Image: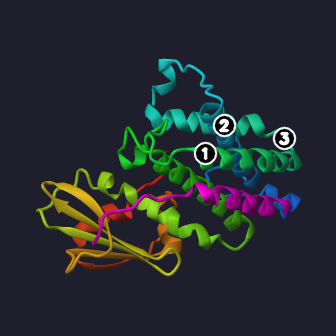
Amino acid sequence: MRALEPVLTSHLFAPINEELLALLRGLSAEEWNAPTVAGSWTVKDVAAHLLATTFGRLSVHRDGYARTESPEAFANGIVGFIDTINRDGVAALRRLSPRILIELHERYGREMAELFESLDAFAPALWGVSWAGEEESPNWFDVARELTERWHHQQQIRDATGRPPLFAYLGPVLDTFVRALPHTYRHVDAPDGTSVVLRITDEGAGTWTLLREDARWSLYAGEAPSPTTRVSLRGDAAWRVFTKQKIDPKAAIEGDERWAGAALGMISIIG
């Protein structure tokens, strides 16, 4: 086992935006209206959501503009607030044509990539990564979280239209997702020395160990010797589980199964 290293992803936003542009340019009219696993959203709605989050990032991060929200906006907590923003953002862009959506993604996706490249990776981020239990996070973690959003929503479009997946990005995506493990296990009591290994096979391969020490859970890269529990997942199943898709993960569990359930219920997105 070894200490975790930062997941540095700012250099990936320009190429992943180019992948998105190529994908959207190749869609037929029928495919733009295809349903996705993102609730009631169509492919066009998912593309609009990605654009709305780009606008939000640039407005707040680059331009220093943030609307003052009333206390009522948080009546249903941060998840309810984010869900409302996402719903309103998609609704506001529904009248735009696919051509205009693509043109806006081309310009503002490039500008967001430039913004992330300009940030000090280790300076405090504007927002903590809440699904990892952090009120304060460094920029690299917030930026990596944004990459996971852009990757998994693009993957939803690819799934809906039968396009091949972008597994070249799955390694850093999963390395970011697993940072939610200690927060996910925060209410799981276990004797010190209990170790839960999460092993991703095939696409996005990687191995991490969650170790109970001093009555708290700590996450390490690599595999503990003689782990208490080992959970193995294929990469293509892992990202779906961690983004709330209802699938059978077909996980292989070795050792004490009591400690496997929380890992298979981990959610690494807001909402």
Q: Nearer the viewer, mark 2 or mark 3?
A: 2
Which quadrant of the rendered structure holds the N terminus?
bottom left
Tell me if I can see residue 225 in this picture.
Answer: yes
Q: Nearer the viewer, mark 1 or mark 2?
A: 1
Q: Is residue 82 above or below residue 33?
A: above
Of labels 3 and 1, earlier in sequence is 3
**In the rendered structure, which amino acid carries the disc numbered 1?**
Ser
In the image, which disc is placed on residue 255?
none
Measured from the top left, where is residue 237 in percent x and y? 50, 71
User: Which secondary structure dominates the residues rendered in magenta?
Assistant: helix
**10 Å crowding of disc 1: few (<14), some (14-19), many (20+):** few
Q: Residue at x 52, y 62 (%)?
A: 173
**In the rendered structure, which amino acid carries the disc numbered 2?**
Leu
Tell me if I can see residue 240 in this picture.
Answer: no
In the image, which disc is placed on residue 58?
2
Do the CB atoms of the residues marked 1 and 2 lie less than 8 Å apart? no
Q: Is residue 75 magenta?
A: no
**Which residues make up the magenta segment?**
1-25
- The residue that mark 1 highlights is 118
**10 Å crowding of disc 3: few (<14), some (14-19), many (20+):** few
Q: Is residue 183 left or right of residue 204?
A: left
Secondary structure beneath label 2: helix
In the image, which disc is placed on residue 96?
3
Measured from the top left, where is residue 101 in percent x and y? 81, 47
Of labels 1 and 2, earlier in sequence is 2
Q: Residue at x 45, y 64 (%)?
A: 175
Q: Nearer the viewer, mark 3 or mark 1?
A: 1
**In the rendered structure, which amino acid carries the disc numbered 3?**
Leu
Disc 1 from disc 2: Cα separation: 13 Å
Q: Is residue 226 above or below residue 77?
A: below
